[in-house]
Amino acid sequence: MKQSTRFMKFIGGLNLFYTLALLILIGITIFIYSKISFIFHPIIVIFSTITAPIILAFIAYYLLNPIVDLLERIRIKRIWGIVIIILGISGLLTGVILLTAPAIESQIKELVKNFPLYLSQLGNEITSWLQNSFLGPYYDEGYNWVITNFSDIPGMIGTYLADAFQGVRNVASTITNVFVSIITFPFILFFLLKDGERFKEFSLKLLPPKFREDTNQILKNMDTQVGSYIQGQIIVATCIGILLFIGYLIIGLDYAITLAIVAAVTSVIPYLGPTIAIIPAVIIAIVDSPFMILKLAIVWIAVQFLEGNFISPNVMGRTMQIHPLTIIIVLLIAGNLFGIVGVVLGIPGYAILKVLVAYFYDKFRSRYNKYYGEEYGAYQVSKDERN
């Protein structure tokens, strides 16, 4: 009886049954919602409309908030610091776009026009090599097998693209959403920078006093994890783009600025991004000449060496200690569930989940120590592990 009582206390006693009842009610609510979801369609539209600018605003918040705090420490009022930064960055971006847009537009148009030719020429070179190599006797048989099994690939790709764009009702609605995001994002960012801390304090006051300290610690850990990741990835991606642009210019690779921008954007995705970024550069280099491939390999190895040994260790630090295999698995799962948004936001989402799991596991160990520690041995719960 004593063991049973202690076990019931360990798992929470009556609180456990209240929690299970609450979960059942939530499940029933979700089931009912699935049957009458059409009623909530206007709410879904509202949330889908404001999600994009809110995400953009939070990313910019983590990038700019340290600068605003720095200006505040040197006795510039926060609101004026925010205005100075937003206007300064807006002017800088506008100037950069005006200066580089013509060259980028020209390169993109030329690349889109010529890339199919690059692919065709690459295919012809591979075919010629296969026919003249030791694989020549098997070429016709393999070619026929490929034609038989993969001849419908263009149709499959067309069907896939049609399905992918089926959710986009028309171009006008898409342009409207983009326009709304661009217009509303600066206002959301302004109030996040101005009142972010006050909003957090207000939200904590809505909770019972018993839960405020723990909730504040969880939010602080989440803020550190997500903020460090976003700041680090943006800085690292920018450095990679600049280094590759310089390297591409030195070796004389065509479409240098466009390929560097592609590399910078895709480098936001850990591990998988650089692999995606190098593919178009490799295709262009192969078609150009074998010597260009060698020069591209040297540039890519040099940039990866600098990024891996100097940039990432100093920028990212050791704040997010996530195993590379875990990152790849998270990206694959998040991408499969949520598409490109999942790939971009998968790691920050995992960081938030990791903080929550670490918090509840810490609570579990504390309860175990309380009810079973003296008899069976206690978990070692350190302050560093909780933080």
Image (cartoon, rainbow, N blue to C red):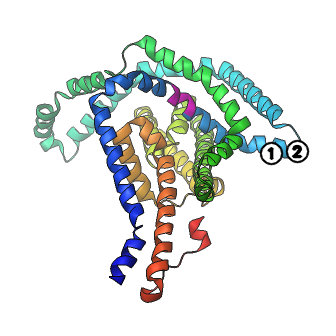
Report the quarter where the C terminus lies: bottom right
Expressed as whole percent of the image width and height from the top left, the position of residue 152 reads 17, 27
The answer to whether marks 1 and 2 mark residues whose Cβ atoms lie closer than 8 Å is yes
- Closest to the observer: 297 or 337? 337
Quarter that holds the N terminus: bottom left
Mark 2 is surrounded, within 10 Å at the Cα level, by few (under 14), some (14 to 19) or many (20 or more) other residues, namely few
Q: Position of residue 178 (x, y in %)?
A: 52, 20
Main SS of residues in magenta: helix
Amino acid at the residue labelled 1 = Leu
Q: Residues within 10 Å of mark 1 (few under 14, many from 20)?
A: few
Residue 53 magenta: yes
Callout 1: SS: helix
Residue 26 on the magenta segment: no
From the viewer's perspective, is 221 left or right of 286?
Answer: right
Distance from the alpha carbon under mark 1 to that under mark 2? 7 Å
* Identity of the residue drawn at 33% across and 39% down: 29
Highlighted magenta segment, given as a residue range: 50-54
- 143 vs 202, nearest the viewer: 202
Q: Is residue 254 visible?
A: no
- Residue 230 at what x, y percent from top left? 59, 45
96 lies above or below 280: above
Give me the residue at 60% from left, 38% from top: 59
Q: Check the image and report above or below for 274 versus 122.
A: below
Extreme residue in the top direction: 172
User: Circle 1 sits on which residue?
Assistant: 70
Please state if 93 lies on the left or on the right of 127 as rendered.
right
Residue positioned most to the right: 75
Q: Quadrant of residue 261?
A: top right
**Image mark for residue 74:** 2
Image check: 250 left or right of 64?
Answer: left
- What amino acid type is highlighted by mark number 2? Ile
